Image (cartoon, helix red, strand yellow):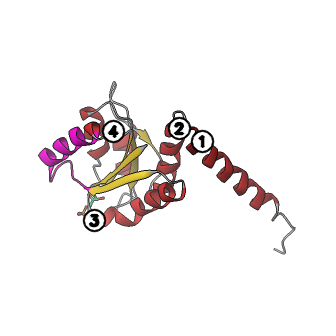
């Protein structure tokens, strides 16, 4: 059960840390690496081949601006790719969001909200839970706990 987190620049680290934290909480093994589609394209290609041989089952790819990283990765492998659009500039992440969500067929990228690294990890876990019953159980416990916490905290508030 392995996830690879890849992101385009060290400046993306705070957003991608949120994905790593969720994976740790749900006990999913992951690797994390900075690789750029336009700065290190050959290394990116070699790394994707290595991840395939290594048994990686989902890739989370974060990038900002033109954000071609997740689409390029998706073109290199059949491993499902979840893109995290990152707000790295004046367009507030809309540039990255559209670059990922508008991938032309037949090379899809599943996309979460801008800067939502955590949701990328939850989605990766749900994909993996189809195959790993232990992870499915941990997700179910997490959801039940979340609901119980909220339902136990619904007193009327002063506004
Ligand atoms: C993208 O360009 C990266 O994913 C990052 O979000 C953005 C800016 O990168 P830096 O100039 O901060 O390295 O490739």
Kindly tell me whether mark 3's CB lies below 8 Å from ligand 1: yes
Q: Could you tell me how far apart the alpha carbons at marks 2 and 3 are, in whole angstroms?
A: 32 Å
Are the two marked residues, 4 and 2, in contact with CB atoms closer than 8 angstroms?
A: no
Marker disc for residue 132 = 2
Which image quadrant for residue 20? bottom left
Q: Mark 1 points at which residue?
A: 136
- N-term mark: 3 or 4: 3
Mark 1 closeness class: few <14, some 14–19, many ≥20 residues within 10 Å: some
Quadrant that contains the N terminus:
top left
- Report helix, strand or loop for mark 1: helix
Which residues are drawn in magenta? 34-51
Q: Tell me where residue 152 appears, x and y as whole percent.
A: 82, 62
Tell me, yes or no, whether the two marked residues, 2 and 1, touch with CB atoms within 8 Å.
yes
How far, Cα to Cα, is label 4 from label 2? 14 Å
In percent of width and height, residue 6 lies at 31, 52
Farthest residue in the front direction? 134
State the residue at coordinates (32%, 56%): 32
User: Which residue is under mark 4?
Assistant: 55
Judging by the rendered image, the residue that carries numbered circle 3 is 10
Seen at 20% across and 48% down, the residue is 37
The secondary element bearing badge 3 is classed as helix
Q: Is 56 displayed left or right of 110 in the figure? A: left
> Ligand 1 lies in which image quarter?
bottom left
Looking at the image, residue 112 sits to the left or right of residue 159; the answer is left
């Amino acid at each position: 059960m392995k996830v690879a987190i890849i992101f385009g620049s060290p400046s993306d680290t705070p957003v991608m840390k949120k994905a790593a934290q969720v994976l740790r909480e749900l006990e999913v093994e992951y690797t994390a690496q900075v690789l750029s589609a336009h700065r290190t394209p050959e290394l990116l290609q070699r790394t994707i081949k290595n991840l395939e041989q290594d048994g990686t089952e989902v890739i989370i790819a974060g990038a900002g601006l033109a954000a071609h990283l997740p689409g390029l990765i998706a073109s290199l492998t059949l491993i499902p790719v979840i893109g995290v659009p990152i707000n790295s500039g004046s367009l507030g992440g809309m540039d990255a969001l559209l670059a990922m969500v508008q991938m032309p067929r037949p090379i899809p990228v599943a996309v979460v909200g801008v800067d939502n690294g955590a949701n990328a990890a939850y989605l990766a876990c749900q994909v993996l839970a189809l195959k790993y019953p232990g992870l499915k159980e941990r997700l179910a416990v997490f959801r039940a706990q979340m609901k119980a916490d909220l339902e136990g905290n619904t007193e009327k508030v002063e506004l």
